Image (cartoon, rainbow, N blue to C red):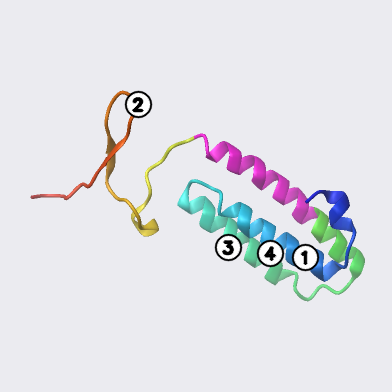
Amino acid sequence: MSIVSALKGDLPQQARSLYRQLLRQGEQFQAYNFREYAKRRTKDAFREHVSVGDPREIQSLIQKGLKELQMMKRQTVVSQFYQIDRLVVEGGLSGKQTGGSGDITRQKDTGWD
């Protein structure tokens, strides 16, 4: 969604659209902590400004949100360059990466046996 197309339409619809885009983009982070921070920050920012009624102020907040969205898109691209192991809180495959010649084999670390 470009800034020009965001200006066409009513403010509540624009705000909802921006909210959904920010949440979706935050899910693109590779690191669990960044994903959770982006989700929490987006929700907190929208809750903080829920009582704003002035259309000009709402429009300025939407513009600020669009800038944040563009920054988040750049950050998620950079975060995808780095391969990291999943954390235990994320679920899914666990263990450490081993292997050679470019292939990755996931082995479960069973601890002290």
Which amino acid, by three-letter code, is at mark 1? Ala
Q: What residue is at 39 percent from the left and 57 percent from the top?
A: 90
Marks 2 and 1: which is nearer the front? 2
Disc with the residue nearer the chain's start (3 vs 4): 3
The quadrant holding residue 47 is bottom right
Q: Which mark is residue 45?
A: 4
Which amino acid, by three-letter code, is at mark 4? Ala
Crowding at label 3, few (<14), some or many (≥20) Cα neighbours within 10 Å?
few
Q: Secondary structure at mark 3?
A: helix
> What is the spatial separation of the Cα atoms under label 2 and label 1, in whole angstroms?
45 Å
Q: Position of residue 16 (x, y in %)?
A: 74, 67
Residue at the disc numbered 2: 102
Marks 2 and 3: which is nearer the front? 2
> What is the spatial separation of the Cα atoms under label 4 and label 2, in whole angstroms?
42 Å
Crowding at label 4, few (<14), some or many (≥20) Cα neighbours within 10 Å?
few
Crowding at label 2, few (<14), some or many (≥20) Cα neighbours within 10 Å?
few
Marks 4 and 2: which is nearer the front? 2
Q: What residue is at 77 percent from the left and 52 percent from the top?
A: 66
Residue at the disc numbered 1: 15
> What is the spatial separation of the Cα atoms under label 3 and label 4, in whole angstroms?
9 Å
Q: Which mark is residue 38?
A: none
Q: Secondary structure at mark 2?
A: loop
> What is the spatial separation of the Cα atoms under label 4 and label 1, in whole angstroms?
12 Å
Which amino acid, by three-letter code, is at mark 3? Arg
Start-end of magenta stretch: 64-81
Say if mark 1 contacts mark 3, CB within 8 Å.
Answer: no
